[in-house]
Amino acid sequence: MDSLAKNTLQQQFPQLESPLAEEILEHSTLRLVKEGEEALRTGQYIRSTVLVLSGLLKVYREDEHSNEFLMYYLEPGSACALSIMCTARSEKSQVMIKAVEDSEVILIPSHLTESWLAKYKSWYNFVIASYRQRFEELLQTLDSVAFKNLDQRLLFYLKRHVKVSGSDIKLSHQQIAYELNTSREVISRLLKKLEQRGAIILHRNSIEAHNLNSL
């Protein structure tokens, strides 16, 4: 990889020790995933562990009718914990990964990531931390679905999106409806209520968040 990728790796993953960072740069592949492009599909064998250098990707499940269920986002400095696990066990993916915006990812070959667990303490700690973070996010998502009504789920969804990508939410009402498994009309009505309460400002195909944390 070039020097720019090296600098970005060091900035986004400062916890990784220098010899490990050098191995990543030497043996891995840098890939640009365009907005809307799928980085991984359900049923595909995962051959590489995914580290995110820039951009934003979403990890989600999809049913036979192409309905989506958002699990969590992958932001710069993070890894896909499922890709680490499936790579180590040579398993097929049970999720989809799609770029929300243009993103750069590092693909680490499977034969390296397992050996690094014993070789590099920083990699071991990073993997454990990634598992824990994603598990906690999945618990939050499960709680949202199991114990909250739709307006609370929408608020949770918007807050999570703001946390990873900022207050300018570039999503249409239809996209949000897909991910919350409901209709566009219902989402539009609930968003209008949030706008009336001063929490958001609605624009065409985007939402400007203002006071979500006050609700």
Image (cartoon, rainbow, N blue to C red):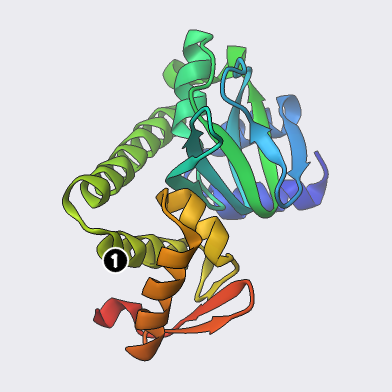
Q: Residue at x 53, y 33 (%)?
A: 65
Quarter of image, res 190: bottom left
Q: Is residue 69 above or below residue 192?
A: above
- Say left or right for 40 vs 162: right
Label 1, residues with CA under 10 Å away: few <14, some 14-19, many ≥20 = some
- Say left or right for 197 vs 60: left
Q: Nearer the viewer, residue 35 or 62?
A: 62
> Is residue 161 visible from the viewing direction of this image?
yes
Q: Is residue 85 above or below residue 168?
A: above
Q: Which residue is mark 1?
A: 151
Q: Residue at x 58, y 65 (%)?
A: 171
Q: Residue at x 30, y 59 (%)?
A: 153
Q: Is residue 195 above or below residue 98?
A: below
In which quadrant is the N terminus drawn? top right
Q: Nearer the viewer, residue 148 or 94?
A: 148
Instruction: Name which residue type carries label 1.
Output: Asp
Q: Secondary structure at mark 1?
A: helix
Residue most extreme to the left: 147
Query: Residue 142: x, y in percent?
Result: 26, 43
Count of picture labels: 1
Query: Residue 212: x, y in percent?
Result: 34, 78
Query: Residue 4: x, y in percent?
Result: 78, 52
Q: Nearer the viewer, residue 89 or 170?
A: 170
In which quadrant is the C terminus drawn? bottom left
Residue most extreme to the right: 2
Q: Nearer the viewer, residue 21 or 56?
A: 56
Query: Residue 163: x, y in percent?
Result: 42, 65
> Is residue 115 visible from the viewing direction of this image?
no
